[in-house]
Image (cartoon, helix red, strand yellow):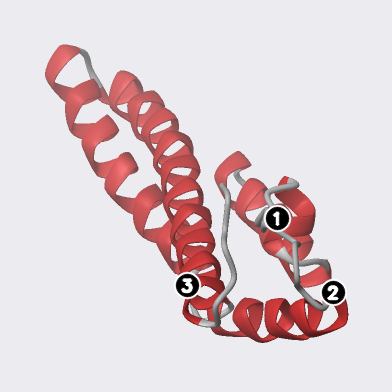
Amino acid sequence: MSKVNFSLLLLLNLAACSSAETLTGNNPIIDTQGVSISQYNADLSECQAYADEVQIAAKATSGAVSGAVVGGVFGAVIGNSDTAKRGAGVGAVGGTARGVSEGLRERQRVIKRCLIGRGYRVLN
């Protein structure tokens, strides 16, 4: 199994076991003055459910493919087929990381907008 496939498989398994916020430690910070924490937790769970619609794995796959293509082309231009293969591998790893990062940022935006829409003052 290639390193890229293994990395993607590991990421997907981690994501299946826990929420992205738990994995990244990137929970929204709200002003709790006058807020019922039990209601907030219920609203946060609902907002996270909406954010589950963000396709992080699809973004990672798309990033891996585009990174591999760009890296492979760049490697082919400056070297031979071995350089093209290495360039494709490096590009795929970088593209996967970029795709996951974009997906996590989008997920956070969805959660924060949802909470703001429900009247919370999101501080971060």
Of the residues under marks 2 and 1, which one precedes in the sequence?
1
State the residue at coordinates (59%, 52%). Answer: 5
Looking at the rendering, which quadrant does residue 35 occupy?
A: bottom right
How far across and how far down the image is residue 98, in percent? Answer: 42, 42
Judged left or right of residue 17, residue 92 is: left
Label 1 crowding class (10 Å Cα cut-off): few <14, some 14-19, many 20+? Answer: some
Q: Earlier in the sequence, mark 1 or mark 3?
A: 1
- On residue 55, the disc is 3
Label annotation for residue 10: none
Q: Residue at x 12, y 20 (%)?
A: 77
Q: Is residue 84 left or right of residue 124?
A: left
Quarter-wise, where is residue 3 in the image?
A: top right
Give the labeled residue for mark 1. 27
Callout 3: SS: loop
Q: Viewer-proximal residue, 36 or 93?
A: 36
Residue ID at (48%, 37%)? 93
User: At label 1, which amino acid type do we have?
Assistant: Asn
Numbered circles on residues, count:
3
Nearest to N terminus: mark 3 or mark 2: 2
- Residue matched to label 2: 37
Q: Secondary structure at mark 1?
A: loop
Q: Amino acid at mark 2?
A: Ile
User: Residue 80: x, y in percent?
Assistant: 23, 18
Inspect this view and state whether residue 1 appears.
Answer: no
Mark 3 near mark 2, Cβ–Cβ under 8 Å?
Answer: no
The image quadrant that residue 72 belongs to is top left
Circle 2: element type: helix
Q: Is residue 84 left or right of residue 52?
A: left
Furthest residue to the front? 34
What residue do we see at 49% from left, 46% from top?
Answer: 101
Rounded to the nearest whole Å, what is the CA distance between mark 2 and mark 1?
14 Å
